Amino acid sequence: MRSLKLLLTGTLVLLFSLGSPANAQETSIHGAISGLWFDAERPGYGLQVEIINPREAVIGWYAYDQNGNPLWLFGVGEIRAMTINASLMSFRGGTFPPGLDPAAVVGERWGEINVEFQDCDTAQLSWSPEASGFNSGSTELSRLTAIDGLSCGAAETFHRVVEFNFDAGPGPWSALFADFSDAQRDSIDTAAAWDA
């Protein structure tokens, strides 16, 4: 039988993710940014943000075209720190269900948007259209809705380094063994010990 022995020596450094005060410095967008955002000075259009993983967000921009018709733009954006950059598409050719023919729906690239979040409740939206008839611009956004159960501001996370020295013994630590299959369990002896 092969033997496995774990010796606890030296200093162990761990990273813990803990709750912090509301004024903690946010370094990356997380799920609590999800919700509806709007321009408080010009209500009537807005942005829907859904964080789907640490690197991507779904963006829906509910606006109007040059003739005042509703214009809904959608895309999947890339998250970098506190910013989401997305290419948005517009769609045409659909009808109200059940008469919708999916083959008749056509998507066209509309342009790029950039959403930079200052904190949990304010953001800056800027856009660069490629579709004709639209101008580039920017506006301030405020949070309109949040997702129930997701806390933004009151429980931001940060990392704290905690050191533990094994010089006086193993303390409360116990060993875990991994990377072997159930079939190997009977052919491997595992043991853990502290040694000065």
Image: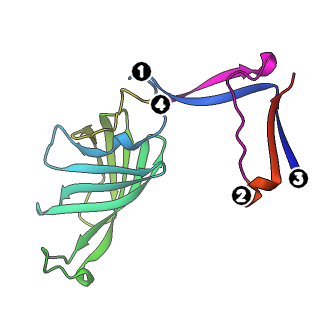
Q: Tag 3 or tag 4, which sits nearer the N-term?
A: 3
152 w.r.t. 107: above or below: above
Residue at figure coordinates x 86%, y 25% from the top left: 195
Whole-angstrom CA distance, mark 2 to mark 1, is 43 Å
Three-letter code for the amino acid on which mark 2 is drawn: Ser
Please report whichever mark, 1 or 4, sits nearer to the chain's N-terminal start: 1
Q: Which of the numbered marks, if any, corresponds to residue 53?
A: none
On the image, numbered disc 2 is attached to which residue? Answer: 181
Query: Viewed as shown, does residue 25 lie left or right of 60?
Result: right
Question: Label 4 is placed on what type of residue?
Answer: Thr
Which labelled disc corresponds to residue 157? 4
| SS for callout 3 | loop
Mark whose residue sits in front, 2 or 1: 2
Query: Mark 3 = which residue?
Result: 1
Dot 4: few (<14), some (14–19), or many (≥20) neighbours within 10 Å? many
Asked whether 169 falls inside the magenta stretch, the response is yes
Classify mark 2: helix, strand or loop: loop
* Vertical relation: 161 (above or below) 34: above
The magenta segment? 158-179
Q: Nearer the viewer, mark 3 or mark 2?
A: 3
Position of residue 56 relative to residue 7, above or below, is below
Q: Which residue is mark 1?
A: 21
